[in-house]
Image (tube, rainbow, N blue to C red):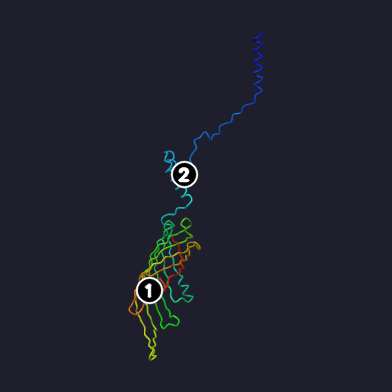
Amino acid sequence: MKRTLLILVTMLVAAVGMAQQPERHVTPVKDPTNRTLEPDRSLSEAYVAQVLSGDTLRAQAEARKDSLRRVYKRYPLITGLSVGVNIGDLLLAAFGQDYGCVDVEGVLNMWNRLQPVVQVGVGWAKSTPDEMNYTYRGKLSPYFKLGVNYNILFKHSPDYQALVGYRFGYSTFGYDVTDVTYTGNYWRETTQWQLKGEHSHAVWGEVCAGLKVKLWGPVSMGWMLRYHWLHTYGKTTHSRPWYIPGYGTRSGRLAVSLTVYYNIK
């Protein structure tokens, strides 16, 4: 009887102790942690496969390429095609320049970076220098240029370009030197003579730098500063050419062009 009473008292004390202990809370496991995490969708499948295969160096190189592709837009091989008309000399001739030229220019924009250029034009001249005794008439003659531009802003929109480039030029032309007067020292007699039908040619190179900006729709405008030099030019028995179509005056080194473009693509 005593043993039974002792067992009951012990059970009662244990029950009271358990009732006084604080309730335990179990934090539930969140559902996303029980799933396999997927790789970042911005990473290519090749990168993920290389990481899983253990080729981490190659994977890092691919990741750098992917990041560059996301930062810098990649333009197609044929980014654009433009046709332009150089009107710079026409404007200068309207303000009194003694010579001028006009040309048509075709530009192919590749990757928004390299731009092969073809130019075909004509030039002319008529000048009677102050305090000189002759008149120079350059006949309307053709010239040709081949070259390339490099767009420094290739990472940006093709609508705005900063260009550097090179041109190789050639012209064959004719000119007259008339109203040449000569006064003898002894008898002081004045004679007149002229040179007509003179022919020459010239080959030159030029480096250039400029800008091209979009005006509206498919129309753009470009400014180009050119530094040029003669490789060779033809001399006649009696004279040398003063003006070379597409180049400018023979002794000149700098020229400026202003071109209006129509962007076909």
Judge from the rendering whether residue 77 lies leftward or rightward of residue 28; answer left or right: left
Judge from the rendering whether residue 20 lies leftward or rightward of residue 200; answer left or right: right
Element at badge 1?
strand
**x and y percentages locating residue 134 in the rendered image:** 40, 82
**x and y percentages locating residue 177 in the rendered image:** 38, 80
Tell me, yes or no, if residue 144 can be seen here. no
Earlier in the chain: of badge 2 and badge 1, it is 2
Q: Residue extending furthest bottom?
A: 187
Q: Residues within 10 Å of mark 2 (few under 14, many from 20)?
A: few
Q: Quadrant of the C terminus?
A: bottom left
Q: Quadrant of the N terminus?
A: top right
Q: Residue extending furthest left?
A: 237
**x and y percentages locating residue 253 in the rendered image:** 43, 70
Residue at left offset 38%, top offset 73%: 141
- The residue where tag 1 is placed is 141
Q: Is residue 45 above or below residue 259?
A: above
Q: Residues within 10 Å of mark 1 (few under 14, many from 20)?
A: some
Q: Amino acid at mark 2?
A: Leu
- The residue where tag 2 is placed is 43
**x and y percentages locating residue 209 in the rendered image:** 45, 64
How many dots with numbers? Answer: 2
Element at badge 2?
loop
Residue at left offset 48%, top offset 51%: 71
Judge from the rendering whether residue 200 lies leftward or rightward of residue 6; answer left or right: left
